[in-house]
Image: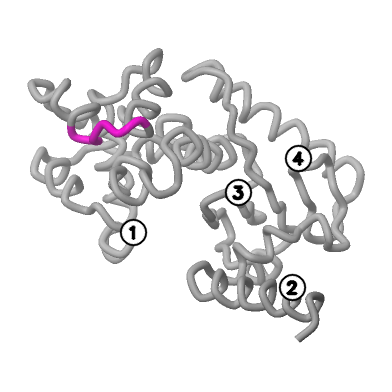
């Protein structure tokens, strides 16, 4: 076999191998620059027809989300790719719902924003997921960060009314129970809205905003999630507040 043939074979084999591990939407995200999409910048792609005023609004929302993260936790250093979809079908084509979804690979995160997720709350929420992965590292994230914590942390930047602590009324046992939901399969199987709300309350005493990114980087350096976030706050018990609207 010629050298060029060997190279082609190795590339094809690599694509098949990667595709067997990661879903096709993540693979597609990796080749976004080769697709015929309108681009706002090197990281934001528009999947669908967006008039100039719409594109400008999207750009401003992305900037506002970055500012929100910076204000609460510090400047984000992750560089996720964003795919902004024009309609529900376009979102579904990218493996997303009408609000948002994220596709992860070891070297990149890809955030798909659906037509109902084009607001600063959803964009900041998803971007913090990307930031957590970047700070911790893909494989350390899988090993150490439970889904309830990842989702609860993202909700600290999501100011939609159902997820504000003052609008959540759950008994203590529900807050305790959500901490057992460490995988996506368990977290997103039943009572999803309640799980989101419980996770928001559960992370409240665990995250020190001025220290959060540094704490994540401790996990990247080899410390355990339990030592960094749980043991240091073991004596603090979360409590829910007033009833939801």
**Residue segment shown in magenta:** 221-226
Location of residue 212 by image quarter: top left
Indicate whether 200 appears above or below 174: above
Residue 243 belongs to magenta span: no
Identify residue for label 2.
Answer: 7
Question: What's the CA distance linking mark 2 and mark 3?
Answer: 42 Å
In this rendering, the count of numbered labels is 4
In the rendering, at what x and y percent does residue 94 appear?
64, 66
Foreground: 224 or 168? 224
Q: Residue furthest bottom?
A: 1
Would residue 225 be counted in the magenta stretch? yes
Q: Earlier in the sequence, mark 1 or mark 4?
A: 4
- Dot 4 corresponds to which residue? 58
Asked whether residue 239 is in view, the answer is: no
For disc 3, the neighbor class at 10 Å (few under 14, some 14 to 19, many from 20) is: some
Task: Give the SS element for disc 1.
Answer: helix
Residue 143 point in image, percent of width and height: 30, 49
Q: Describe the element under mark 2 as helix, strand or loop.
A: helix
Task: Give the Cα separation between the discs numbered 4 and 3.
Answer: 11 Å
Residue ID for mark 1: 184
Q: Which residue is mark 3?
A: 117
């Amino acid at each position: 076999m010629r050298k060029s043939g060997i190279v082609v074979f190795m590339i094809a084999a690599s694509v098949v191998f990667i595709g067997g591990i990661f879903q096709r939407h993540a693979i597609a995200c990796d080749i976004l620059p080769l697709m015929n999409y309108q681009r706002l910048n090197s990281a934001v792609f528009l999947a669908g027809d967006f008039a100039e005023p719409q594109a400008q609004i999207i750009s401003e929302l992305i900037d506002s989300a970055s500012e929100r993260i910076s204000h609460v936790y510090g400047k984000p250093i992750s560089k996720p790719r964003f795919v902004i979809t024009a309609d529900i079908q376009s979102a579904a084509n990218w493996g997303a719902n009408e609000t948002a979804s994220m596709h992860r690979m070891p070297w990149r995160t890809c955030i798909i924003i659906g037509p109902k997720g084009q607001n600063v709350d959803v964009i900041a929420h998803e971007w913090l997921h990307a930031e957590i992965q970047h700070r911790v590292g893909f494989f350390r994230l899988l090993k150490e960060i439970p889904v309830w914590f990842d989702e609860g942390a993202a909700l600290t930047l999501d100011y939609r009314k159902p997820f504000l602590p003052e609008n959540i009324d759950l008994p203590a046992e529900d807050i305790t129970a959500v901490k057992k939901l460490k995988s996506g399969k368990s977290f997103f199987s039943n009572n999803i809205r309640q799980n989101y709300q419980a996770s928001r309350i559960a992370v409240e005493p665990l995250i020190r905003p001025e220290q959060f990114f540094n704490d994540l980087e401790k996990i990247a350096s080899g410390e355990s999630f339990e030592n960094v976030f749980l043991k240091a706050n073991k004596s603090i018990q979360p409590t829910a507040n007033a009833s939801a609207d």
